[in-house]
Image: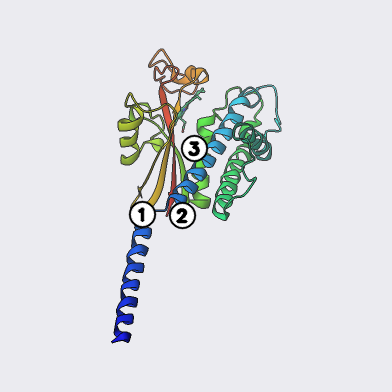
Amino acid sequence: MKRSLLAAFFERMVVLALAVGLCVSAAPAAADIEADIRLGNALADLLRAGRTVVSSSQPLINDPELGDKGFSGERLIDEAKALYAKSTGASPLGGDMSERDRRLLEAQMLAMQRIVDSHQAEINRKGLGFKGFIPAVFARLANEEFAQIAGKEALIRVTAPMNLVRNRKARPDAWEREVVEQKFLSGDWPKGEPYTETAEYEGRPAFRMLLPEYYRESCLSCHGGPQGETDITGYPKEGGKIGDLGGVISIVIFK
Ligand code: HEC
């Protein structure tokens, strides 16, 4: 009698433990989501820092008088790290960080470095002014390179509202499109606030994060008005205004 009661008790405990275990694995723990948000922000901030370096280096890159510009991948990474530290208060690989985060941020730096290094001939070409090595192109190529290195674990993309997409490769997927249209373009979305969700990417479960980006003065020589006029890169201008949603950084972290 005593033994069977005990057995029943243990049986119940096992069932309870299994049930608790199932609940925990079905819904990601808050700590996991927090860690993913931290990583998503770090990847986005580092991409932005790299783009800013390419942006502020445009006069150098586009100088037709100068051959060797000394604008190496290493230099880009040094300057991007410094910018990152200035805007976030810490260096990208500084402080306590998980192995996954370190691996993915290192992969991103390697990707950005490789893109600048593989464009040296173009960057150093004498006699040519505007070279088309602009922040958006740099970012797209670096993100593609990142996917080559770490695409099984994570992806970084830059996309935009459908009517603004220039490069077909930047077209939003159905999920991105819905968030852009239903959240970011709705009048009441808090400016700059990212959107996160545990969703799928191409059939795989993933943590997904979208960070809205708005046009600033420096964007309008290409994305501003008059709408339809050709910009220096050969694309028709979008007629955008300062503060309009110009695009989104899209982060996927596979589970
Ligand atoms: C010198 C012209 C120029 C400037 C300045 C410029 N862009 Fe772009 N932008 C482009 C071109 C060209 C592309 C397409 C790049 C490619 O081939 O992937 C692009 C692509 C983009 C994309 C990716 C989606 C797409 O349409 O392919 C976003 C988002 C974007 N730009 C936002 C901005 C923002 C925000 C700024 C200002 C901070 C800015 N751009 C400044 C020329 C420019």
Residue 173 visible to the viewer: no
Q: Residue furthest front?
A: 2
Q: Secondary structure at mark 2?
A: loop
Quadrant containing the C terminus is bottom left
Q: Are marks 3 and 2 in contact (CB under 8 Å)?
A: no
User: Residue at label 1?
Assistant: 27
The residue drawn where x is 35% and y is 50% is 202
Residue 58 percent coordinates (x, y): 61, 25
Count neighbours of disc 3 (C-alpha within 10 A) and say few if under 14, some if 14 to 19, many if 20 or more: many
Residue, far top? 226
Instruction: Indicate which label's residue lies in the foreground, 3 or 2.
Output: 2
Residue 129, quarter of picture: top right
Which residue has dot 2 on it?
Answer: 152
Q: Earlier in the sequence, mark 3 or mark 1?
A: 1
The relative height of residue 138 versus residue 30 in the rendered view (above or below) is: above
Q: Which mark is residue 140?
A: 3
